[in-house]
Amino acid sequence: MADAQGHGPVGRWSADVRPADVALTAALCAVTTWMVALMVTSVGWAVRVDSHSWWQLPVFLAATAPVLVWRRHLASALGVMVGAMAVHVLAFGYVVRCGAGLPVAFVAAFLVGCAHDRRRGVPMLVAAGAFATLVLVRDTAAGLALLPVGLLVQAGLWAVGQVARSRSALADELRARTRELQALRDERTALEVADDRARVSLELEALLDERLARLELAASSQDAGVAVFTGLEEDSRRTLEDMRRVVGVLRGGEVALVPAPSVAHVEGLLARRGSARLSVDGDPRTLPPSLELSAYRIVEHLLSVLDDDPDCAVALGFSDDALEIRVAGRVPRGADVRAAVSRARERARLHAGSLEAKVSRGRARVVATLPTAVATAIG
């Protein structure tokens, strides 16, 4: 019967078996096969060997193979291993088991330390010790005289497994915290953009309401004439200046009425960086001021997270209905590329444009398209 995700029992078990488990189990089974084959085929052993039967091999492999599924249920695996080794001892008597059996016992102790904490792991460590005892109880090469050393080695490997388990848990927790921090950073960036938009919207709305009220009052005056139209012109100019001040605050608190950056200033921006290259395709022309400013800001945002070297390149493509901006370069370690791309994409969306970014092998490639027809209609 399949589970809710469509995986059958075999799929569920295979999902808990990793390549490292397969390699470890294959190595242990290879050692077991070699040792049993050597014992079965060789004659004239200096120690006692009660059986030369090939049936020793499948029984010994049954005591080794459960290592493969230790992640699924370690207690069951240890139970099968201890049971199979007990059958081997009873069925074949005195033989040489330590060469193949002790490595399996040591691996079992280490896996117990990796899988469970001290409270749950101690009973399983006892089972691993029982496995080592069965390996040596009728072993004619080492015997029970080696058991204290074997148990001591098992205890040391179990402690190493405990350390590995704690380090792995710490690494998992750090990865989870990193993902949470990245999500919080993205949320904060979105909130800052939304807050800036709301603040500017409220200030512009209040400013325009005030100015429109004054214009309406002036237009309804009974003494309309040259003075009235002069006042209208002055109020209009002040309105534009106030709007520029609000936009300047949005740009970072600058209120000086200097010319806004434009596409023509991109070359100067690159010159200040030193090694970055600029190329222009198509027929350059003057675009609406808002689009020129956004194009400059997009390039500025992206260059702020790229290395200053000859590989950094900016290309401007002028077509009949759009301005295409291409930026490419190497990303230094620790650069907040996602935040820079988010700010640049918001600039593109202001003009019904788009921005595509790709970061691969330490290099970033960004293509932004700003429709000029929409900007001209708005202007």
Image (spheres, rainbow, N blue to C red):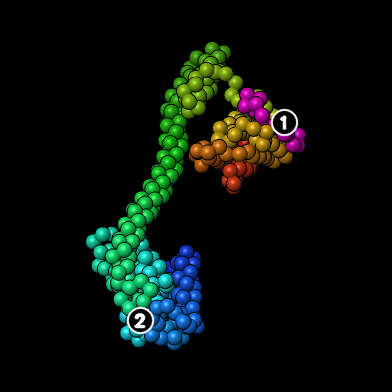
Circle 2 — which element?
loop
Labelled disc at residue 285: 1
Q: Nearer the viewer, residue 260 or 227?
A: 260
Residue at image point 52% right, 20% down: 241
Where residue 165 sits, quadrant-wise, is bottom left
Residue at image point 73% right, 34% down: 280
Q: Nearer the viewer, residue 5 or 46?
A: 46
Mark sitting earlier along the chain (2/1): 2
**Left or right of residue 264: residue 189:** left
In the image, is residue 239 part of the stretch drawn in magenta? no
Where residue 111 sits, quadrant-wise, is bottom left
- On screen, 252 above or below 230? below
Task: Say what amino acid the circle numbered 2 marks.
Answer: Tyr
In the image, is residue 273 part of the stretch drawn in magenta? yes
Task: Say what amino acid the circle numbered 1 marks.
Answer: Arg
Where residue 63 sits, quadrant-wise, is bottom left
Instruction: Please count the marks in the image.
Output: 2
Asked if disc 2 and disc 1 are in contact, CB closer than 8 Å, the reply is no
Q: Is residue 288 visible?
A: no
Badge 2: residue crowd in 10 Å (few <14, some 14–19, many ≥20) = many
Residue at image point 42% right, 71% down: 99
Q: Which residues are magenta?
A: 269-285
Q: CA distance from mark 2 to mark 1?
A: 95 Å
- On screen, 313 above or below 129? above
> Residue 307 placed where, x, y %?
59, 34
> Residue 256 placed where, x, y %?
52, 17
Badge 1: residue crowd in 10 Å (few <14, some 14–19, many ≥20) = few
Q: Nearer the viewer, residue 222 or 17?
A: 17
Residue at image point 36% right, 76% down: 140
> Residue 98 placed where, x, y %?
38, 72
What residue did someone put label 2 on?
94
